[in-house]
Image (cartoon, grey):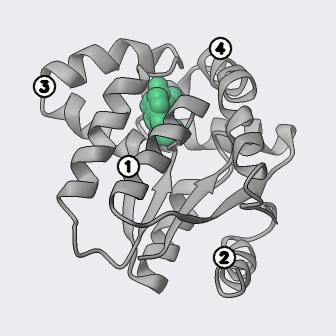
Amino acid sequence: MTNFVLFGPPGSGKGTQSEKLIAQYGLIHLSTGDLLRKEIKNGTPLGKEAESLMQKGQLVPDEVVIGMIAGALDSNLNANGFLFDGFPRTVAQAKALDNLLTLKKTHIKAVLFLQVDEDELIARLVKRGETSGRADDADPAVQRKRQDVYKNETLPVADYYENFDKVQRIDGEGSIDEIFERLKSVVETV
Ligand code: AMP
């Protein structure tokens, strides 16, 4: 099993590049944002708990997302590997993920960290807000909040993985195909 984390701020292109990576390498895509949006759509209690936090650009509690990931790992025991997208977003989540993977006798091979300039991020999010139908994309105040949460709570996750020498920084600017080529060359050499 070969597992990767696709890491980067909101708007860095994780969703777009995830689709291409899973198709190329036969990985299972685990996006906690997508899983949470599915819970909201299905009107589950978990979805109801998550919805107002997501609309404000705040994080859903660690135990909620860790529980979802644990369930997804258990339902895909024969997977080639997983691509984690939007998870882990806190150091506690990263540690929990390490424990879950250790129990399954596997680990994170590399953290693919997409680097995008902040002005470019905001420009992309404004554009996405026009088409994605996501309430958390449409409001500039929520976008700013999401970038703040990223800096304060999620960036330390990169430091955590640096301790294990797992972080690969990739230029996340340019065309979708250019960025994908850079990702592929890292995935194939780590
Ligand atoms: P995303 O689709 O990854 O941008 O996530 C959208 C929203 O879902 C985030 O702003 C958070 O409110 C919530 N969310 C997604 N993944 C996580 C996570 N790993 N931990 C906490 N909250 C999350």
Which is more N-terminal, label 2 or label 3? 3
- Mark 3 residue type: Thr
Callout in the foreground (4, 3)? 3
Q: Residue at x 85, y 38 (%)?
A: 119
Task: Tell me, yes or no, whether the two marked residues, 2 and 1, touch with CB atoms within 8 Å.
Answer: no
- Mark 4 residue type: Ala
Can residue 103 be seen?
yes
Q: Is residue 85 above or below residue 10?
A: below
Can residue 90 be seen?
no
Q: Residue at x 73, y 55 (%)?
A: 164
| Badge 4: residue crowd in 10 Å (few <14, some 14–19, many ≥20) | few
* Residue that label 2 marks: 180
* Residue that label 1 marks: 100
Local secondary structure at mark 1: helix
Measure how far apart labels 4 and 3 are at the Cα level: 27 Å
Callout in the foreground (4, 1)? 1
Callout in the foreground (2, 4)? 2
Local secondary structure at mark 4: helix
Q: Residue at x 45, y 39 (%)?
A: 96
Name the image quarter holding residue 127.
top right
Measure how far apart labels 2 and 1 are at the Cα level: 28 Å
Name the image quarter holding residue 69.
top left
Return the x and y of residue 176 as percentages of the image width and height: 67, 71
* Residue that label 3 marks: 44
Return the x and y of residue 141 as percentages of the image width and height: 65, 14
Which is more N-terminal, label 1 or label 2? 1
| Badge 2: residue crowd in 10 Å (few <14, some 14–19, many ≥20) | some
